[in-house]
Image (cartoon, rainbow, N blue to C red):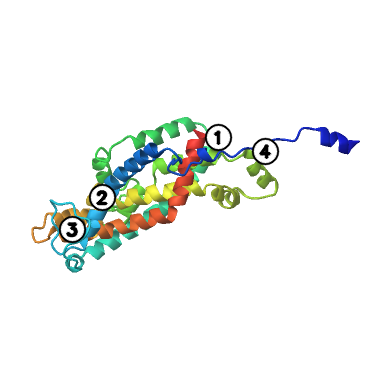
Amino acid sequence: MSIAKASSRPRPKRPQVNSSSFDTALGWQPGRTATTLLRAAVCAIILFVFAGPILTIIAGAFDLNPDPTRLTLIPRNPSLENFAVATQRGIWGFFWNSLLIAGFGLLLQIIVAVTAGYALARRKFRGQAIVLGIFLATMMLPEEVVAVPLAVVLGDLPLVGISLRGTIFAVILPVAASAFSILVMAAFMRDIPDEIVEAATIDGASEMRILIEIILPMCKPALGVVAIFGFIGIWDQYLLPIIAANRTSDYMITVALASLRADVQVGTGVLLAGAFLALIPSLIVYLLLQNSLVRGITSGAIKG
């Protein structure tokens, strides 16, 4: 009887796959030639606008006599002479200064962002809204506005009375706290279900263990976003290294390239070789963490 009843029931309809609505990541749809061509043209224009300067830097760095007035994608006279001259000008010393400052600065920035974001997202304390407002306000202040107060603080550190100028800490400590990184981490941690944290607490896990073993693995996309934007932000610092340095040998590569530009004996090819070296770390960091960046941005869009 049950079999007869089962056979008499209407079978559920299988979902029909409409091949005409198949979309790729670029929104390509078969059968719409005009739309496809238009989208391909728009993508090509955008790619040229963003990739053109990078390809020009690479071509000019390997060109013995680059012409700055012409857009060249292939070196006409391939040579490594520009890198040899840049090495004689001490470009590798500035490069390692930048790498050291960006590495330690990013490490401190992630630690501060994780701990501060956890406090804002998982704890309730008096004045929490005011703290959030202060973080947002710091994001709206131009770097030039805080340059003079920052120079005074670095020259005479409050409560301690020592000067950090001429040391690596003068560049690392101001970038250790980023309002953007803290708010990103707080936003991701706030969406973690309370039941997961409560279950770990019942099992006897300490708060530090919950943060490291449970919450941080769930925040990998946010860590990727913080790492990429934090590294590029520190690497591209220009005004802070000038304020903090006492000698030109303490400059980061961004400041050193500007200084080399004023040297009449340095040609355009040497500057492009230095710019090419300065470009490599940011590209490596982006390529390593691009999946986390995409997941972080898309998850933020879904929440919104």
Q: In this view, does 213 lie to the left or right of 177?
A: right
Residue situated in front as seen by the camera: 52 or 279 = 52
Mark 1: give few (<14), some (14-19) or many (20+) Cα within 10 Å. Answer: few
Distance from Cα at disc 2 to Cα at disc 4: 49 Å
Q: Earlier in the sequence, mark 3 or mark 1?
A: 1
The amino acid pointed to by label 1 is Lys
Q: Does residue 160 show up?
A: no
Q: In which quarter of the image is residue 262?
A: bottom left
Q: Where is residue 73 in the image (x, y as percent from the top left)?
A: 22, 56
Distance from Cα at disc 3 to Cα at disc 4: 63 Å
Q: Position of residue 189 (x, y in %)?
A: 53, 41
The amino acid pointed to by label 4 is Arg
Distance from Cα at disc 2 to Cα at disc 1: 49 Å
The residue pinned by badge 4 equals 14
Q: Which residue is drawn at 22% across and 51% down?
A: 242
The amino acid pointed to by label 2 is Gly
The residue pinned by badge 3 equals 271
Q: Which residue lies furthest to the left in this view?
A: 264
The residue pinned by badge 1 equals 124
Residue situated in front as seen by the camera: 127 or 105 = 105
